[in-house]
Amino acid sequence: MEYILEVKNLTKEFPGVKALDNVSINVKPGEILALCGENGAGKSTLIKVLSGIYPHGNYNGEVYYKGKLVKNNNVKDAEALGISTIFQELELIKDLSVRENLFLGDLPTRLGFVKWDEVMAKSVESVREIGLDVDLEKNVRELSVAQQQMIEIAKALTKNAEVLILDEPTSALTTNEIGRLFELINQLKAQGIACIYISHKLDEVFELADRVTVIRDGKHIETKDIKDTNRNELISMMVGRKLTNLFPEQHLEKKEVALEVKNYSVLDANGKKLVDDVSFNVHRGEVVGFFGVVGAGRTELMSALFGAHKWGKSGKVLLDGKELKINNTQDAIKNGVAYVSEDRKAHGLVLGMSVGHNITLSSLRKMGKVLLNNTKEITESQEYMEKMAVKAPSLETIASSLSGGNQQKVVLAKWMLTNPKILILDEPTRGIDVAVKYEIYNIINRFAEQGIVVILVSSELEEILGVSTRTIVMREGKIVGEFDKGTATQEFVAKYATGNE
Ligand SMILES: Nc1ncnc2c1ncn2[C@@H]1O[C@H](COP(=O)(O)OP(=O)(O)OP(=O)(O)O)[C@@H](O)[C@H]1O
Ligand SMILES: [Mg+2]
């Protein structure tokens, strides 16, 4: 048997969209196949066919597993064959414990009783295997996005997969966690497990994959051995044209101080300082980047500035010399603070609402509170749909039917439309393809040129150093370093962030 999984002439249509158009791919046992393409190219749709979300009969074309035609009715059928998928959108149930989530839908039973001893042993084992340090009885809601993602991976491992499909598994993981995940994938590969790996991070593709398949607009463009291609070629295949620079040129001029944050602390439920007495300024004409490892306190700092903290905080925030009193998110929006958060499902998008309404959600006040079919609403959201290249049939499209990256663009558009005075972007390009990243960086620069205070939080050093005019490094709740653009290398900043300087 050469291929464990073969897809032949797959076509899948949605109303108004041909998501897949006659695509064929295959993967061998012990092989890692990367799947690359722009936002909306059809990657997740392909995965959803393989994983049984779209059942047999719901698409045209055939899927073969170990040479036999696959007729899955649901995800369970695919898993029973040996195909396990970690989906792009986290599937965890937030009010169940970690342990319960690990066995969602298939708790081992003996004569109808749940074998809790087995559940215990297996979950401890799988969580240890991925090197995750969490309390298994905690509600998933209390875990970070990164931890939640690791739980998903542990979940797949408890199911003895022979084909493991990962749809952007690292978008929320830190460098260390990614390293651990890659070790794991390579371990599985050595055991003969096949892997289909989707990522917008090309470094990962070149590090992991044996072969790469590129799809664009639902069509198969090319499949190549990884050693026969390179970064630039891959980008060109994905976007359909040459893209020479990853970052747009900046023409920013540092002017007067706009934002002052003084002796700012943020506490958790037990009074422990998550952010510990930090002070910093942002000038007009700057893009200030915040870098740090998970737990450094960046997200806690930013969400507190936006009034979204749960427990105590202290310190002062001044904009143009005037103190801002922000105790909740309403205060923040009123004062012109916009926050694009890292977890779009929790704070960013109402998935059951249309794209148009999602975009205008936060600026209803500005628009005079008229909700439906307001001409102004339509024009402005249309404008941002175009700026951000949101790929959707129309503004009426329900947000949940957009591809992952396109959902993220809607979140961004929504906040940009509020005309903010202070724009805080927390991992804004997560899951976004290279061409649109470039557009987002352009928009960030334009905001800074207009004198808007722009703060960027990102775990991608290349992005932080490429976009920020100044980078502030946080560690364990404190500011530990600050670098002007061009004065520090990635290695140097990384050392600061981990305390190895
Ligand atoms: N349930 C659905 N209903 C309608 N259209 C859909 C649905 N799911 C996906 N689409 C559309 O099909 C196309 C492909 O989407 P898909 O999610 O496969 O993209 P993707 O390659 O995974 O992109 P991303 O990198 O942004 O995750 C998009 O235009 C998307 O809007
Ligand atoms: Mg996707």
Image (cartoon, rainbow, N blue to C red):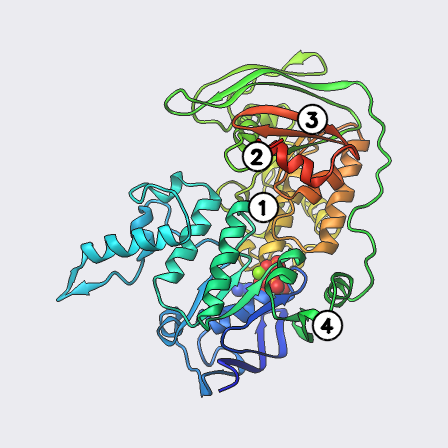
Query: Residue beneath label 2, please?
Result: 498
How far across and down, in percent of the image, does residue 144 sit? 45, 41
How far across and down, in percent of the image, does residue 85 sit? 45, 65
**Marks 2 and 4, how far apart at CA:** 36 Å
The circle on residue 482 is 3
Give the residue displayed 54% in from the left and 68% down from the top. 196
**Marks 2 and 1, how far apart at CA:** 38 Å
Q: Is residue 146 above or below residue 241?
A: above
- Callout 3–callout 4 Cβ contact below 8 Å: no
Query: Residue beneath label 4, please?
Result: 228
Label 2: few (<14), some (14–19) or many (≥20) C-alpha neighbours in 10 Å: some
Q: Secondary structure at mark 3?
A: strand
Label 3: few (<14), some (14–19) or many (≥20) C-alpha neighbours in 10 Å: many
Q: Is residue 248 above or below residue 34?
A: above
Label 4: few (<14), some (14–19) or many (≥20) C-alpha neighbours in 10 Å: few
Q: Where's the C terminus, which quadrant?
A: top right
Of tags 3 and 1, which is closer to the observer? Answer: 3
Q: Earlier in the sequence, mark 3 or mark 4?
A: 4
Query: Residue beneath label 1, please?
Result: 358
Q: Earlier in the sequence, mark 2 or mark 3?
A: 3
Q: Is mark 1 within 8 Å of ligand 1?
A: no
